[in-house]
Image (spheres, rainbow, N blue to C red):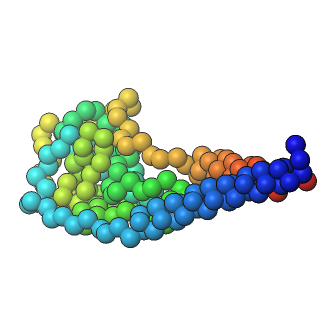
Amino acid sequence: MSPRRTARRTAVSRTTALAGATALTGALLAGGLLTVTGTAAHADCAGPFDGTGDHVFSGIAEKNDGPYTRFSVQRVWEGDDLAADVWVLAGQEQAPWPLSLLVGVSSSVDAEFEVGQQYVVGTTEEFATNVCQVATLDELSVPEDARQPVAGGEKGAELPMGPLGRTVLVVGVVGGLVLLFRALRRRVHGPR
């Protein structure tokens, strides 16, 4: 192949690679800007919590982890048997890292639990709740058929990936991006 033809083919390859990288970067930025500009949802409760739900229990809020709260269950009012400690999704699930750095999701009915306080909590089958399904123990009477938590009971909502998993994910993503940019660079500039 002639040097002139090789130079032209290399120039076309570089232009194509740069155009592709520019388009990808633009799409990612546009997608990020669109998600950042979202608005908060607003809703009102139809009335006070009446103590019903797929799962209803009384317990003490032990730990908050993002939109999740761990409860020490005192009594199970309704639904399947529960373990002594149950996790509840008390707000909106957040986007995975690194999108969570750019986008926060919330609603006017997200429940906020104060650690150490006692609550009556109603949840969906997936152990999600909101402010409309929460009361203090003095607002509702404990039913006569309320029972104790059990060792093999439901443990509640599944928490998202922990810090170790997120770290492994970040290292993998960054490593993949480095390899991708190296490959693009070699393709555009040739091997060094």
Quadrant of the rendered structure where residue 77 is? top left
Considering every residue shown, the one lying at the far top of the view is 152
From the viewer's side, name the closer residue of 53 and 100.
Answer: 100
| Residue 172 visible (yes or no) | yes
Residue 2, how many percent across, how many down?
89, 47
* Quadrant of the rendered image containing residue 76: top left
Where residue 121 sits: x, y (%)? 24, 51
Q: Is residue 181 visible?
A: no
Give x and y (percent) for residue 188: 77, 55
Q: Is residue 144 left or right of residue 168?
A: left
* Residue ID at (38%, 29%): 152
How many discs mark residues in the rendered view?
0
Q: Quadrant of the N terminus?
A: top right
Q: Residue at x 31, y 36 (%)?
A: 82
**Closer to the camera, 87 or 42?**
42
Q: Residue at x 69, y 54 (%)?
A: 17
Spot the residue most to the left.
47
Q: Position of residue 114 (x, y in %)?
A: 35, 64
Say which residue appears at 64% left-offset and 50% top-offset. 173
In the image, taking residue 51 as reference, residue 89 lies left or right, namely right
